[in-house]
Amino acid sequence: MKIWMPCSPHQLVAFAQSGQLELPTGFAITPEWAAVVDDDDEEFLEDAMLDQAGTDATLVVVAELPGTIQNPETGEVVVEAAATNRNLRAFFAKSDAADEDFSWFGPTETANLLDFLGFSTN
């Protein structure tokens, strides 16, 4: 399932070094969550899920991973595997907590993302 996972910049640095990112929880679009959001447009639902996953985070990782749905109405998921370069779909980041919009980064743009977040890649 496609899971949106809040992530810290320090966890991203560890991912850049190890190639694995273990995030215990995330969010997925469930039929129950989509009914609460009251929309069926896939792009709108993905944007709404990004906003939900990024409520208290400046970084959200999206990956295709196995997970167990904990709360269908909120889409909360327990993530059952580590994210790797093979299952990553995208990174979304804000320059700081006050920024309202996320910027998109592809799965191979970890160095650019770290630079965007103010972390040196040297």
Image (cartoon, grey):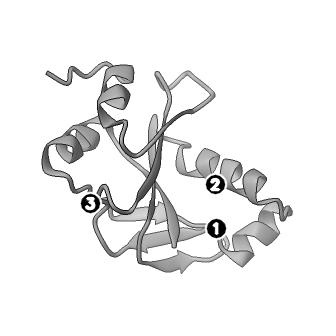
Residue 89 vertical placement versus 32 (above, below): above
Kindly state the secondary structure of the residue where label 1 is placed: loop
Q: Percent position (x, y) of residue 23? A: 32, 59
Q: Residue at x 46, y 34 (%)?
A: 58
Which residue bears the numbered disc 3? Answer: 22
Q: Residue at x 84, y 65 (%)?
A: 40
**Do residues under tags 1 and 2 come within 8 Å of each other at their CB atoms?**
yes
Q: Residue at x 79, y 66 (%)?
A: 36
C-alpha span from label 1 to label 2: 7 Å
Q: Under tag 3, what secondary structure? A: loop
| Label located before the other in sequence (1 or 2) | 1
Amino acid bearing label 1: Ile
Q: State the residue position of label 2.
A: 49
Whole-percent x and y of residue 95?
47, 22
Q: Locate residue 110, reporting x and y percent.
A: 32, 36
Q: Is residue 11 left or right of residue 113?
A: left
Mark 3 neighbour class, 10 Å CA radius: few under 14, some 14 to 19, many 20 or more:
some
**Which of the marked residues, 3 or 1, is nearer the chain's N terminus?**
3
Point out residue 89 in the picture as x, y percentages from the top left corner.
47, 54
CA separation, marks 3 and 2?
Answer: 20 Å
Q: Which mark is residue 29?
A: 1
Secondary structure of the residue carrying tag 2 is helix
Q: Residues within 10 Å of mark 2 (few under 14, many from 20)?
A: many
Q: Left or right? Give the position of 110 relative to 90.
A: left
The residue that appears at 63% across and 77% down in the rendered structure is 72
Residue type highlighted by circle 3: Glu
Q: Quadrant of the C terminus?
A: top left
Residue closest to the far bottom: 68
State how far apart marks 3 and 1 are (Cα). 20 Å
Q: Is residue 100 left or right of residue 114?
A: right
Q: Which of the marked residues, 3 or 2, is nearer the chain's N terminus?
A: 3
